[in-house]
Amino acid sequence: MSILSRTLLAATLAGALLAPAAAFAGGPDFAAPQLPPPPVPKIVYAAQLGIQGPKTTVCPAEAKVAGWVFTSYPGPVQVMIARKGQGVGAPFTITAKKAANGRYMATYTRTIPIHAAIDAEYRLLVGGGSGVMSNWVPLKASCKVGMPGELGG
């Protein structure tokens, strides 16, 4: 094989080996493949519970309960409410939506009827094994005065 033939063969092989690398290195005709972004990890940052007891000693009355769960993702969040010394209630689902700070927040509100005196503490637990829970929050109502016809009144 002549020197010219060997030179042409070497140039051809070098071009064949280097062309794909040059194309993915930002060549004008080829773009690097676009991979999808990695999934956002589902993180529960915190849970809060608030209870506003009745403002009167007359029963029946009402208490207002509100809960908030702060997450890194939108969608369903499973929660439970526990009463200190009595266990945990059935799980239920609330939905996290975009919050002002770029995170997500799921909310829960409920009005609870109070028919008898109560002195208890509650907390909000987040399901799914995250281990996140709120602080204990008191609910107190004395019901010193009952309405006619009510038990204890």
Image (cartoon, rainbow, N blue to C red):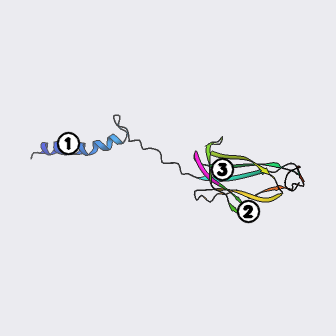
Q: Which residue is mark 2?
A: 84
What kind of residue is marked 1?
Thr
Relative horizontal placement of residue 130, taking residue 144 as reference (left or right): left
Tell which tag, 1 or 2, sits nearer the viewer. Answer: 2
Between 94 and 34, the one nearer to me in the picture: 94
Tell which tag, 3 or 1, sits nearer the viewer. Answer: 3
Q: CA distance from mark 3 to mark 1?
A: 64 Å
Where, by quadrant of the figure, is residue 34 drawn?
top left
What segment carries the magenta color? 73-79
**Residue 81: image location, x then y, percent:** 68, 56
Q: CA distance from mark 2 to mark 3?
A: 20 Å
Q: Which residue is mark 1?
A: 12
What residue is drawn where x is 14% and y is 46%?
6
Residue at the bottom extreme, as displayed: 85
Q: Which residue is mark 3?
A: 69
Between 19 and 37, the one nearer to me in the picture: 37
Q: Are marks 1 and 2 in contact (CB under 8 Å)?
A: no
Residue 94 in the image: above or below residue 86: above
What residue is drawn where x is 72% and y is 47%?
110
Q: Quadrant of the C terminus?
A: bottom right
- Is residue 142 highlighted in magenta? no
